[in-house]
Amino acid sequence: MTYGELKQRMTDFGFEDSTYLADPTAMSEFISSINQARQTISQVFPTKGRYDFVQDGTQTGLHRIDMKNKTDNEGDIEFAGTFDSMDSMQMIIDGQVYPFSDYTLEQGYIVVLNYAVIGTFSIFFEKGISLIDLTTPDDFDIEIDQEAEHLVPLLASYHAWLDDDPEKATLYYNEYEQERNILQAKWEERKTKPKARIVGGIRWH
């Protein structure tokens, strides 16, 4: 969902007067409601990112990977958004995937491992979100998992209406809570299903 689409859905939810959102102060409050909702939902339904890299044994010492300073245009990174927290690592040897835990994490975002370990690696992590502001274009992606995108206009409308119309705000929150609980149950069920079996063990070079 784009920012423009989100604004349109919230307009359909009750912001019929477009002149209201033309006021910078009102628009700032509107945006704050959106950011509050996005932050809450991204914590409940985190979006995953992945960073791939190769160690071929030609370098020595410790390899420090600053995940907060990785950018999309580096070519070997496969995510959009910002690094929020570490999830796990895997390595690939001879086409087989293995869990990899022989690394340390400094300051919560710098992954450190020895260059002596040869292989192709993937770092899995949870993405953060970029805050929307008055300069954000309508084609900006709201950076929420696609399954949870529909929750954003509901929770944002709750925050936006809470002071002026608590009754309307409560209706939006009740609908948000109902939809959130349905999605949470779906995610929990998915966690309990058997995952792909990892074949073999670590082979050290």
Image: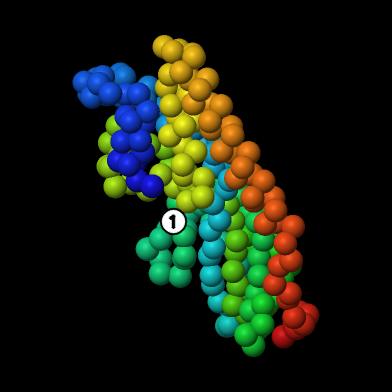
Q: Quadrant of the C terminus?
A: bottom right
Taking the spot 49% from the left edge, 38% from the top edge, the residue there is: 151
> Looking at the image, which is closer to me, 203 or 50?
50
On the rendered structure, is 181 left or right of 15?
right
> Looking at the image, which is closer to me, 153 or 46?
153
Q: Mark 1: which amino acid?
A: Ala
> Looking at the image, which is closer to me, 126 or 151?
151
Taking the spot 42% from the left edge, 22% from the top edge, the residue there is: 160
Q: Tell me which corner region of the image, top left, top right, bottom left or bottom right, holds residue 75.
A: bottom left
User: Does the rendering let one see residue 98?
Assistant: yes
Q: Which residue lies furthest to the bottom in this view?
A: 94
Q: How many labels does the image show?
A: 1
- Circle 1 is placed at which residue position? 80
Residue 6: x %, y % from top left = 36, 38
On the rendered structure, is 126 left or right of 17?
right
Residue 193 against residue 10 in the figure, above or below? below
Secondary element under disc 1, as helix, strand or loop, is loop
Residue 174: x %, y % from top left = 56, 27
Here the colouring is: rainbow
Taking the spot 54% from the left edge, 72% from the top edge, the residue there is: 53
On the rendered structure, is 187 left or right of 23?
right
